Amino acid sequence: MTTKVILDTDIGSDIDDAVCLAYLLAQPACNLLGITTVTGEADKRAMLASTLCKIAGKDIPILPGTEKPLLIKARQPHAAQAAALAKWDHETTFPRGEAIEFLRQTIRANPGEIVLLGIGPMTNLALLFSVDPEIPSLLKSLVLMCGVFTRGESEREWNALNDPHATHIVYQAAVRQHRSIGLDVTTQVKMSSEQFKEKCTTPLLQPVLDFAQVWFQGSDTVTFHDPLAATTIFNDTICTFTPGDVTVELQQPELAGKTDWHPNSSQPRHEVALAVNQERFFEEYFSVF
């Protein structure tokens, strides 16, 4: 049995998106139906995704999505890792302006079967749910790398704050399984750059390591934010999820996008990961390569 997955990603900024996509391409239980990209230079982000798909030998639809947040100024206008593209074979042309419709049609063609994995700012997903409000009810699951739920009163997570209004829309959506993997757990799974380099020995991880050279100019650590979210789709023993409700701050500009967690709700709409088995995660992640 395989699980149908669509990936919405801002690959090209933090290296964890590429690390995540490599896992999905290598995971034999994953039937990856498509990839949509989000935030600035969405075409270049699509090219980065194309590089990994070509190495994996898979012809997967890749569609550049929305580049700007719904209302606020863009915080992520560039895909820095695109600097490494010249070294790798990749597609250079993609359908324009079709990402939201692709998501809509693919989900409608597979009702109750698709896990929508969002590992970037929520703009594409918010537009999808706004254009076709029935879509959330047609998903098998919505899995997000988004938010921070039990740490500091003012701490915000990057995907949530990049488009807070979109984040609010996505958390209002009625999905049968609405899961969030936030900084509470993702910051517990990390490696030094040297450890990561030692692990990147298979062909599919070679371009990831090359993209990571750009990331390592500003950081000597790989934090597996997005890959952790992906592995929970295929191994339900990695994270422990707690039911409750998530609300998104919009009224205070300095806190816009802050995710507030209410675990004692009488009618919980969301599940939030509050514990992670680090050893089990790394075993799951590297086992597919």
Image (cartoon, rainbow, N blue to C red):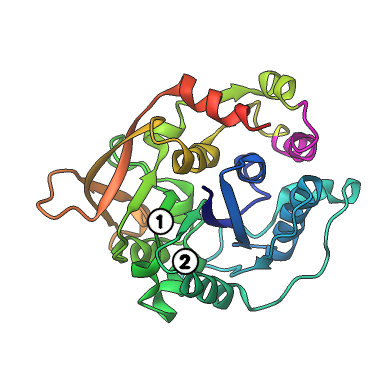
The answer to whether residue 278 is above or below residue 32 is above
Q: Residue at x 44, y 39 (%)?
A: 232
Q: Name which residue type carries label 2.
A: Leu
- Asked if disc 2 and disc 1 are in contact, CB closer than 8 Å, the reply is yes
Which image quadrant for residue 26? top right
Left or right: where 53 falls relative to 177: right
Q: Nearer the viewer, residue 235 or 125?
A: 235
- Classify residue 242 as left or right of residue 161: left
- The x and y percentages for residue 214 are 75, 39
Residue under numbered circle 2? 125
Q: Could one spot residue 120 in this view of the protein?
A: no
The stretch in magenta equals 201-215
Number of labelled discs? 2
Q: Is residue 2 visible?
A: yes
CA distance for labels 2 and 1 = 10 Å
User: Residue 176 sits in which quadrant?
Assistant: bottom left
Residue closest to the eye, 252 or 121: 121
* Residue type indicated by callout 1: Leu
How far across and how far down the image is residue 257, in percent? 37, 55
SS assignment at label 1: strand
The C terminus - image quarter: top right
- Dividing the picture into quadrants, the one containing residue 182 is top left
Crowd class of label 1 (few under 14; some 14 to 19; many from 20; radius 10 Å): many
Residue wearing tag 1? 142
The image shows residue 15 at horizontal and vertical percentages of: 65, 40
x%, y% of residue 184?
Answer: 37, 34
Residue 103 bears which disc, if any?
Answer: none
Considering only vertical position in the picture, is 166 above or below 244?
below
